[in-house]
Image (cartoon, coloured by chain):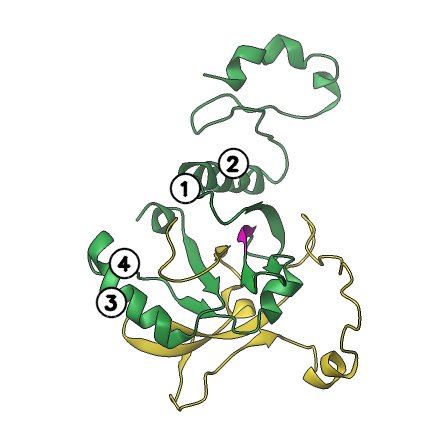
């Protein structure tokens, strides 16, 4: 799995019980993904954890599509929350993790500009780059 | 890392770690008010513990057990829904 290659652990969470998680995995998800879901499917009956993360919709009694990227120090490095009817883009999550890992491994000496993907140019923030980003980064690079 | 749980009739649930249930129920929200989310980029994710299903087993998962690893935590509205 793509996330495993990046050393990323997945946790999913909804207000359903662990028993419903089992049934969903065994009866439906295992037909979509061979072998079923490998990561832990967490239960947040009552939405107390979702409330703390700001994703529990009290009117509907469910959690919205919140996705949080947490680094090895337990620090939130990015999040996205979508309305229930719109699904996530897994590729974008992978791209963000790759960018976050690059920045972390460079110990802050590199930054990923808009439109960055693995293999594309990074920026080296510092006094020499001030006012010179236009020389090394073009707006077209946000879209290619 | 995660310990297996005994399964009883009561539906197990988890919650934030470090917050006592008493304090939460002492102040029932009379009028619904917007609570500020504690999430901020660059700040620690609030720790929590929750029951989980994984690979045929019911386990207990605590976020702080994942320190040292990258984690993607995904919330969604419900099992057997459509998206």
Q: Which residues are magenta?
A: A64-69
Callout 2: SS:
helix
Q: Which residue is mark 1?
A: A90
Count neighbours of disc 4 (C-alpha within 10 A) and say few if under 14, some if 14 to 19, many if 20 or more: some
Element under disc 3: helix
Question: What is the letter of the yellow chain?
Answer: B
Count of marks, rendered view: 4
Per the model, the C-alpha gap separating discs 3 and 2 is: 34 Å
Can you tell which of label 1 and label 2 is closer to the viewer?
1
**Which of the chains bears the disc numbered 4?**
A
Residue holding disc 2: A99
Relative placement, left or right, of A49 versus B76 is right
Q: x and y percent of residue A114 in the render?
A: 57, 24
Task: Verify whether residue B8 appears in magenta.
Answer: no
Distance of label 4 from label 2 (alpha carbons): 30 Å
The reply to whether dot 4 and dot 3 touch (C-beta < 8 Å) is yes
């Amino acid at each position: 799995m793509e996330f495993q290659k990046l050393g990323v652990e997945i946790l999913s969470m909804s207000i359903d019980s662990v028993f419903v998680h089992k049934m969903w995995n065994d009866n439906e998800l295992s037909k979509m993904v061979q072998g079923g879901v490998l990561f832990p499917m967490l239960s947040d009956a009552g939405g107390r954890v979702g409330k703390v993360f700001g994703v529990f919709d009290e009117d509907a009694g469910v959690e919205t599509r919140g996705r949080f990227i947490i680094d090895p120090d337990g620090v939130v490095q990015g999040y996205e929350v979508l309305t229930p009817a719109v699904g996530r883009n897994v590729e974008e999550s992978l791209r963000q993790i790759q960018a976050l890992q690059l920045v972390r491994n460079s110990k802050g000496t590199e930054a990923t500009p808009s439109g960055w993907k693995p293999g594309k140019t990074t920026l080296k923030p510092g006094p020499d780059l001030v006012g010179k980003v236009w020389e090394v980064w073009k707006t077209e690079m946000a879209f290619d | 890392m995660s310990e297996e749980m005994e399964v009883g009739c009561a539906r197990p649930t988890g919650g934030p770690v470090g917050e006592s249930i008493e304090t939460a129920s002492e102040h029932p929200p009379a009028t619904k008010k917007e609570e500020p989310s504690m999430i901020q980029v660059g700040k620690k994710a609030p720790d929590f513990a929750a029951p989980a299903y994984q690979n045929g087993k019911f386990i207990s998962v605590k976020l702080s057990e994942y320190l040292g690893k990258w984690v993607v935590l995904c919330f969604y509205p419900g099992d057997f829904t459509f998206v």
